[in-house]
Image (tube, grey):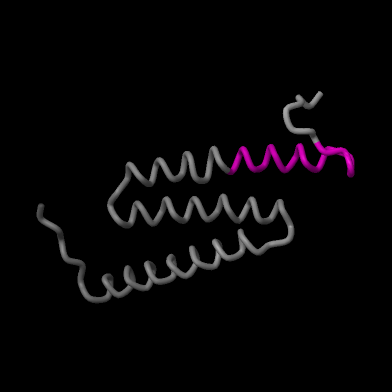
Amino acid sequence: RHQTRVPGDAAMIEHLFDVLLALLITWLGWRAVTDRDSLRAVVTFIALGLMLALTWLRLRAPDLALAEAAVGAGLTGALLLVSLKRRQSRPEGNPIEPGKEES
């Protein structure tokens, strides 16, 4: 496969973009794990999944980028938001007992 070389300034800009993307992914991962606000942590996790999808695109793996966006950010993020909503709508001190359905 023939790859085109990017002229000097454009290559430096691409390298800078990749470094900033790596720093952003590191920061988003740290924030998603350490944030005390559950909603903000879930939104940060979704943003992390989208940035990881962008990373897969930069690595020329569009199939992985699509899977990351759909599963990592989309499906998992939606499930986390639904579970967060269900947790917040339940009165304090009224946990769901294992093996019993919630009404």
Is residue 34 on the magenta stretch?
no
Q: Which residues are magenta?
A: 77-95
Left or right: 84, with 24 as reference point: right
Q: Position of residue 32 (x, y in %)?
A: 61, 59
Q: Main secondary structure of the magenta part?
A: helix
Label total for image: 0
Decide whether residue 82 is among the magenta residues.
Answer: yes
Q: Nearer the viewer, residue 33 or 54?
A: 33
- The residue furthest left is 2
In the picture, measured across the screen, residue 19 lies left or right of residue 33, that is left
Residue 81 appears in which quarter of the rendering? top right
Residue 81 versus residue 97 in the image, above or below: below
Residue appearing at x 79%, y 34% in the figure: 96
Q: Nearer the viewer, residue 21 or 41?
A: 41
Residue drawn at (66%, 56%) of the image:
41
Query: Relative to 49, does residue 74 appear above or below in the rendering?
Result: above
Q: Is residue 7 left or right of residue 31?
A: left
Q: Position of residue 35 (x, y in %)?
A: 68, 62
* Residue 67: x %, y % from top left: 41, 41
Quadrant of the drawing holding the C terminus: top right
Q: Nearer the viewer, residue 96 or 8?
A: 96
